[in-house]
Amino acid sequence: MKTIEWFDGKVRYIDQTKLPLEEIFIETNDYRVMAADIKQLVIRGAPCIGVAAGFAVALGALEIQERERPRFLARLEEVAGEIKSTRPTAVNLFWGVERVMEVARVGVGVDQIKRSALAEAKRMAAEDEDICRRIGAHGSELIQDGFNILTHCNAGALACVDYGTALGVIRAAHEQGKKIHVFVDETRPLLQGARLTAFELTKAGIPMTLITDNMAGHIMRTRKVNCVVVGADRIAANGDTTNKIGTYSVSILAKEHGIPFYVAAPTSTIDLKIAKGDDIVIEERKEDEVTTIQGKRVAPFGVKVANPAFDFAPSKYVSAIITEHGVVRPPFEQGLRSVVSTANQAIRQARQSG
Amino acid sequence: MKTIEWFDGKVRYIDQTKLPLEEIFIETNDYRVMAADIKQLVIRGAPCIGVAAGFAVALGALEIQERERPRFLARLEEVAGEIKSTRPTAVNLFWGVERVMEVARVGVGVDQIKRSALAEAKRMAAEDEDICRRIGAHGSELIQDGFNILTHCNAGALACVDYGTALGVIRAAHEQGKKIHVFVDETRPLLQGARLTAFELTKAGIPMTLITDNMAGHIMRTRKVNCVVVGADRIAANGDTTNKIGTYSVSILAKEHGIPFYVAAPTSTIDLKIAKGDDIVIEERKEDEVTTIQGKRVAPFGVKVANPAFDFAPSKYVSAIITEHGVVRPPFEQGLRSVVSTANQAIRQARQSG
């Protein structure tokens, strides 16, 4: 079962807010439902959001009744804007919308645009799985037999269409027969580590230990942690890696203990237009994500809360960025430009070959 | 209302597991109830545990029916052992038991032992409040007007009889009219920051912002944090400071950002018999503290969990240790010995003057 896919004329995706206790799938042909679900983290994970954004634009295109091309496209641009407004940080959202819009803008007629928009979204979904397996293959070369790996948040199959980025690296190493063990940060406030990564690793039979976020330093000091692998929501041109809140602290703790810190992400997560991490907009989310947990109030009423959803690992603490087109090492600027260029060529070729 | 006190022939204390949503007080004259409540964190916080341990021994003494002094004392030593076995890390537990046992062992008859044991426990409770105010007075000299302070866990009135150690420093600065603001780590797994510290600061009208533990690094980088103040469960002779899990990470993050890291603790928390942090036994608690939050399951069933209740800030990252007998600066060895010696003299004098 994919995290998100085209199924019987609709988009089908798992409700990630209900995991791990309930596995509920949502089917819709309404892009507004998808936009709301991206906002509410029913759909989450940068690569998954990218594919979902593509499907949402395609659903928007299919629904528009205008028969005149300019009016149709004007309305589709509005839909694209609505989808883009859901979350500010993960660049894959904008990338996903733009990929389908690029195809739509060059379409010759309304019906052809509708067909090609959906075809592009489906292509993105298929590509995503392939990309994750290639990230896994490249990244697994960094993982040795017997490694203890620490990960933060969920950069797994649930953050993608399937397989995962950081967890793709871990899965690939496991599939190669390497004996590995994973320490999973629970990742407050929304517990993507405890709920989603623990769920995926357990299903895959990969040995793991769940820890609270504040145990990471102690675990690095007292247990042998050989490397950290995390995903990314947006990678700046200099390699600064924006990812789930707490990633910054983990990168400092890894540096303190001399542990390599690896980022695993598709090239669609690289934003060459952004020079450095400080230029990336950090989404501030609602207070009740901190003051309540699974509906249970844990803090006094009226208390003030900070809830930044992301922070970034400074490039100086990033040992390598693992992409589908290879492992990029510091200094990152040139290597990141190179893999993005390779990826853009691959997209053009895929469109031409249908 | 004190966190713990002698009231109407019984020990009365607040149930800290029910806060902040319910304020429930427990009254008992059974040391077994108190021992169980220390284990279950109904009573928690190193200084509070110390005073509770003293009261528990006194309750044990009052209850023993033996009239023959050697038999009475032998039974009381058993009671002391039971109380000491509740939690391994906070030295105040052993200190509290021993303070009352020292008085008991030199008592001349059973009735006199019973009276003096209770008197010693009451003296400890009274002292604790005075000690906290003196820690506050010393520590507040390190806090300037306009400071942003980060704290971890709860080292407040609830961790003591009243006023608090780390929060004593913060309260004293606030009472002096300094405009301060506190970032409160929620402190998983048991959320003492979100539940207890947020509760105390809100009640005291001290401005604060609640954050999840993994936000601490990001907050230090993006908001002006001027110092960290935490409590302690056991301070080794070299200044290594064992405290709630996550303290180690916070000390590294503070060092990374050039932020002073202060420990506020009574001299009863200093254990000169322990050379360094690595020699302190770290309590490992039950898995369900991590896999469930306030009774709500958050992780898949069957998942493996680590749950060390403490870690330690290495002395090299500790800027100062604030005690009731003054602020000790690195290197800590001599300064710690000096304040412990002063404290022991004060205890002897207090006993002599009744």
Image (cartoon, coloured by chain):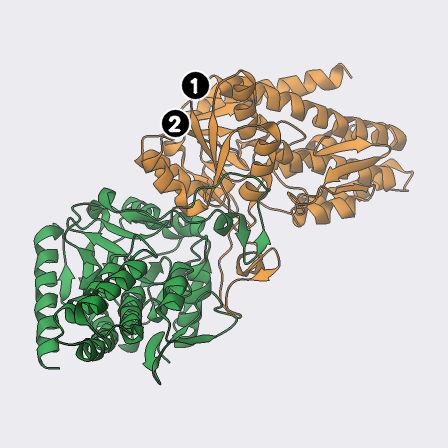
Chain colours: A orange, B green
Residue at 40% over, 41% down: A216
Q: Nearer the viewer, residue B26 or A187?
A: B26
Q: Position of residue A11 (x, y in %)?
A: 79, 36
The C terminus of chain A appears in which quarter of the rendering?
Answer: top right
| Cβ atoms under marks 2 and 1 closer than 8 Å | yes
Please give the residue where the numbered disc 2 appears in the rendered image.
A226
Q: Chain of mark 1?
A: A
Name the side, left or right, on which B75 lies relative to A165: left
Q: Position of residue A157 (x, y in %)?
A: 63, 31
- Mark before the other along the chain sequence, 2 or 1: 1
Q: Is residue A64 above or below residue B233?
A: above
Residue A144 - label = 1
Q: Nearer the viewer, residue B169 or A63?
A: B169
Q: CA distance from mark 2 to mark 1?
A: 9 Å
Give amino acid for label 1.
Gln
Name the side, left or right, on which A134 lies relative to A216: right
User: Mark 2: few, some, or many residues within 10 Å (few <14, many ≥20)?
Assistant: some
Q: For numbered disc 2, what is the local secondary structure?
A: loop
The N terminus of chain A appears in which quarter of the rendering?
Answer: top right
